Each structure stands twice: as structure tokens, then as C-alpha cells.
Amino acid sequence: MPVVIGIIPARYASTRLPGKPLADIHGKSMIRRVYERCAEAGVFARIVVATDDERIAAAVRAFGGEAAMTSPAHPSGSDRAAEVAAGIEADIVVNVQGDEPFVAPAMLEEVTRPLVEDASLPMCTLMHEIPEGSWADPNVVKVAVNLRGEALYFSRSLIPYPRKREGFRAFEHIGIYAYRREFLLEFTRLPVTPLERAESLEQLRVLENGRRLKVVESRAPDYVPLSIDTPEDLELARRLAAEREGQG
């Protein structure tokens, strides 16, 4: 069986919410919640938080997790994950967003399985269906796939445009990535591409370089699509955690 590791990029700096990986959510830090959800998945031989700040590393080690220090100059979480992956023997690397405390463990198995089953696939990610009210939101990244379930394009605009809306399904991209380790290292060495720059979506670099990117429709029943970017997001996360876990 391939060796699968999970890497959780977590940086301290944030324009709207500095230090957010350490933010308390109903008694646990956000980074601890992400780490524990990864551990629940049962697919990882090793889970590492990749960070640029000793405070985050110390907090992770305090709850028994593994942390690795990385350069503060990385432009993206993928670059941070690649620095850690370069020093670890593994076949598959799963990049888990450090600001999604409600990531569903089942999703981590869903994104990993295609690379385990098909050694020719370099990369996989996830999507889920979204309601019509989200179609026009540029913060909701949409994805269109071919008949093999591989990405054709990602966009902040609605794709495809439904001339007939009956039966139309639009899908949001979920930013969890599984990479063949060698491809992750290759991907982060490639220059930024024109469409990537226009949409500010790094996954377009994969498509612009002609590489395959499998996209699986997630069936995880308990996924909460909430990324913590603002104080308002954090308060919502605290309310959701309190409701799920009880007030005690």
C-alpha cells in the first residue's frame, strides 16, 4: 500500500485574523481541531503541521501533534507543504487546509482513494454541489469536469453557464488536495501561469501545464463548508462547535 501523509499548512500572519490557527473554538484551538479531524480519518501514516511560527509549533506539540518549521516566505500553503514533503519519504501527500476546523474525516479518504487506485494520477481534489444562491458569489470557486471526472476549469464565475436551468448542477471546489509526492514538488517549482494569475487560483497551474486533476464529488454527510477568514467566521465556528458538542 502507498504511504500517505497529511500536511496542514498553518501560518500566523493574517490580514483579517492574525494568529487564527491558535484561535479558541469551544475549548480547542482551530489547528488542534483540524489535526484531530485528520487523525480520525485513519488514512495517514503521519500528520504534520507546517508552520512559520514557533507559537503554532509549540501549541501543536503541546497536544501531542507533530509540527515542522518552514520558511515565512512561502506564497501558498502548497509551497509550505512541499517544503515539508521534500524531507519525508511518502508516496502521497494530502494538503489539508488549516483554517477549516469542520473538515470531514471521510473527505480525506475520498481525496486519497483515486491516487491509491490509479498510480498514473498525479493529483486529486474534491467538489460538492451548491445551491443557486451561491452561483454568482466570486468567493465560491466553481469547477467543471469532463466525463472521466477530471477538471476542465476552475473559476470564480459560474461555469458552465446554464442556458436551461432545469436539472443543472453547479459544483464548488473544496480546497483539499492529494498529490503524488513527486508531483507536488514539481508543481511548486512551476512558474505562475496566466489563468492562475487572472483568477488567483493556483490549481489552474496544473491544468495550464496539461496535467490531469481528478475531482471527486464528496459524499461526506457531516461537512461544514466554513473557512475561518474573519472574526465573523470565527464566531460562527464557535457557535457551531457549541451546538455540536453541547455547552458543557
Image (spheres, helix red, strand yellow):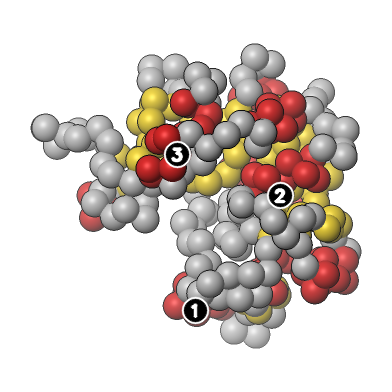
Asked if residue 184 lies left or right of residue 125, the reply is: right
Local crowd size for mark 1, using a 10 Å CA cut-off: few (<14), some (14–19), many (≥20): few
Above or below — where is 78 with respect to 116? Answer: below
In front of the other: 246 or 57? 57
Q: Can you identify the residue that label 1 sits on?
A: 231
Helix, strand or loop under label 3: helix
Judged by depth in the image, the label closer to the viewer, 1 or 3, is 3
Residue at the image point whose x is 52% and y is 54% from the top: 222
Residue 70: give x, y in percent of width and height: 79, 55
Asked if residue 92 lies left or right of residue 165, the reply is: right
Q: Can you identify the residue that label 3 sits on?
A: 196
What residue type is disc 3 on? Glu
Local crowd size for mark 3, using a 10 Å CA cut-off: few (<14), some (14–19), many (≥20): some
Report the disc number at residue 80: 2
Residue 140: give x, y in percent of width and height: 36, 52
Q: CA distance from mark 3 to mark 2?
A: 18 Å
What residue type is disc 1 on? Pro
Residue at the image point whose x is 83% and y is 70% from the top: 54
In front of the other: 10 or 91? 10
Instruction: Determine the image quadrant of residue 187.
Output: top right
Local crowd size for mark 2, using a 10 Å CA cut-off: few (<14), some (14–19), many (≥20): many
Helix, strand or loop under label 2: helix
Judged by depth in the image, the label closer to the viewer, 2 or 1, is 2
Residue at the image point whose x is 65% and y is 36% from the top: 188
Residue at the image point whose x is 67% and y is 33% from the top: 189
